[in-house]
Amino acid sequence: MKIKRGIQLIDQHDRNFMYGGKFGGNFIPETLKKPIEDLTKLFAKLRKDRRFLKERDHYFKSYVGSPTPFIKLENLTDHLGGAQIYAKVVSEANGGAHKIYNATVHCLIAKRAGKKFIVGDTGAGYAGKMLSMAAKKFGLKCKIFMGAKDIQRQRPNVLAMKKNGATIVPVKTGSQTLVDAVSECMRYWVSNCDTTHMCVGSTVGPNIFIKICAWSTAQISRELYKQVKEEFGRIPKKMKLLNCVGGGSSAMGFWNEFMDTDVEFVGIEAGGPKNSKLHAAPLTNGSKVGILHGAAQYVIQDKEGQIGSTESISAGLDYPGISPLHCFLKDAKRARYTSVNDEDALKAYQLVSKLENISPSLEPSHAFYEAIRLAPKLKPSEVIIVNSCGDSIKDKDIIKQKLGTYIR
Amino acid sequence: MRSKIGIAFEKCKKEKRAALITYTVAGDNTKNNSLKILNAISKHADILELGFPHNTPIADGGQIQGSSYRALKNGIKLTDVFQIVKKFKRLNPNKPLIMMGYFNLIFQSGENRFLRNCKASGVDGLIIVDLPYPENKKFARKCKKKSIEFVQLLSPTTSNIRMKKIIKDSHEMIYYISMLSTTGGKLKVSPKKIIQNYEKIKRINNKKNIVIGFGITNKTISSLKKADGLVVGSQLCKKIANSLKNRLNAAKVLDKVVYNLKRKII
């Protein structure tokens, strides 16, 4: 399996929308064929539409707050010794996470499609919060599907969604987390696809949703590419981009513009609690290819093909599957994947929040732990950049409960 | 040799009525009970659909999700499903049985192995919810080689051009999804409109047996009896759930329910 140079990764699929002949595709009920085909055509057109691109850039700048800061973590670097550690503080984007890019683009598309309703899924609540924000801004009625367990553990984002006027539908089936929220959201779309636009919250699902999401979050690396060149005068030879991966949307956006460079990509999955057999790391733990939410991907499942349970302290990474794009990157050996457990993610949150002016949420804390693990082994000439794609404030309750105190 | 599914439709046409097709989930709530239910309802139903449960069913509503959950909770595996089919077929060798489910289970089992097991246990047809046309062409051909009916699906969103292509590549039976909904939704389109769409499909190819499903209950079934066949699923799953809750014999309850459904389309 090989990545082609000079072609956007999202476009490197075959006629059946499969990456590397193996990942992705559209495993969907007949009813969704037409709406997905329509959306595919519309998006293909909009991608080339100058006015649409101008509109996107305008909102990314004036509404999302682009570019987000690129900073050196001096104290952390000194503390660890070794590689220079930087952060792309995507959590500074409007709403506090990368999910705003996908949400904004989906609302712009929904407007173009003439849809008045928009629905979406959410795990950590960021995708839902951003979609509700953008929907409010663009005058769309919004419905968010969220697992009942996640509603409990991500209260601040739930409150934000409510404030934005979104209807939150608690999903009480299965594990009551993201996987069930996505299923329920797709079911809702099957029933309402004539009037409603669906936004899948990550680079998962039927192919078109993977494309739209990765195309939207790519803004992160467009900014970063410039910022890195400004900082170093060139793209450093030995540079690593570290990003947590659940569905994989922030990592795709973080890496996209560096695809054809020598920069090393490291994806960090959620390893789950230290003493638990459960995890949310299908790539690290060698899960088999299966079909989940309309796409073939490495997915946690049993021998029969029943989707397996997952566990992670971070709701945003607590998903049994992983974007087909990441499966493709893994098999093509363009990216490397590893996992970090709950306890270590908490340690990383604590250390970064103590030493620096940023306070990463539990999702990017997984990536920060990998940086902490790697940096001392590397030379000072080497560079590590971590995508700090969410803010810890949403995890206040969990952190307090686990560590006793919350610092930010 | 005529397929059992084809023979069943022929028989109904001779009797000038729609075929009654039932859907229940294998292993709901146990292997034995689901077999008993199949045996009981096969007296009235012309074709039986048997779901092989998946725990992430993206096109199913609450009732079928519930049935699948009960079955999986009691540890149902694909081999058990085939065993249920085998046992059922031993008693009812001529009653056509169609297995219905999601592709991942077939994918994990391996297409060829899955089809061998279908053949060995006597499965007559397959409906795979999330393997649409044209992605299903290869698998449908494999089914045909084994004389297993691959049932294509059509929906109100299927365009005319696409419809013609699908019908052209279809086998004997086609499943028309009555409305935009998951299974078990309330019928939100008028029966008149559904029959209009049905007739549009029939005009493309009159020889195919078109069955209508989704939203069909004892209340709506008679208004659609013009069709070649009608599928009732979620209502049966709901009756099973109620029987379990009230500690009634689900097979007996379903026997009666299906008998009454049949009466409404004669």
Image (cartoon, grey):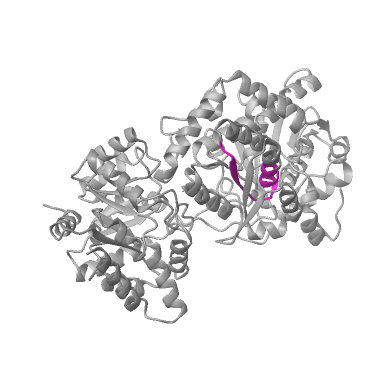
The residue sitting at the left extreme is B1
Q: Is residue A277 left or right of residue A236?
A: left
Q: Is residue A27 left or right of residue B147?
A: right
Q: In the current view of this chain or complex, which residue is farthest to the bottom?
A: B247
Q: Position of residue A379 (x, y in %)?
A: 78, 31
Task: Locate residue A183 relative to residue A136 in the image: left or right.
Answer: left
Placement of B116 over or under A298, stated as above or below: below
Q: Quadrant of residue A210?
A: top right
Residue B238 colored magenta? no
Q: How many marks?
A: 0
For the point 33% across and 48% down, the residue is B111
Q: Position of residue B265 (x, y in %)?
A: 25, 63
Give the image location of residue A169, x and y in percent: 62, 55
- Residue A82's place in the image compared with B43, above or below, is above
Foreground pick, B202 / B247: B202
Residue A178 relative to residue A188: left or right: right
Q: Is residue A127 magenta?
A: yes
Residues B175 and A279: in front is: B175
Whole-percent x, y for residue A325 in the image: 55, 36
Nearest the viewer among B184 and A182 is B184
Specify whether residue A26 is in view.
yes
Q: Is residue A289 visible?
A: no
Rendered position, B20 above or below A358: below
Q: What's the residue at 60%, 49% (across, down)?
A: A281
Q: Quadrant of residue A376?
A: top right
Q: In the image, which residues are magenta? A: A115-132
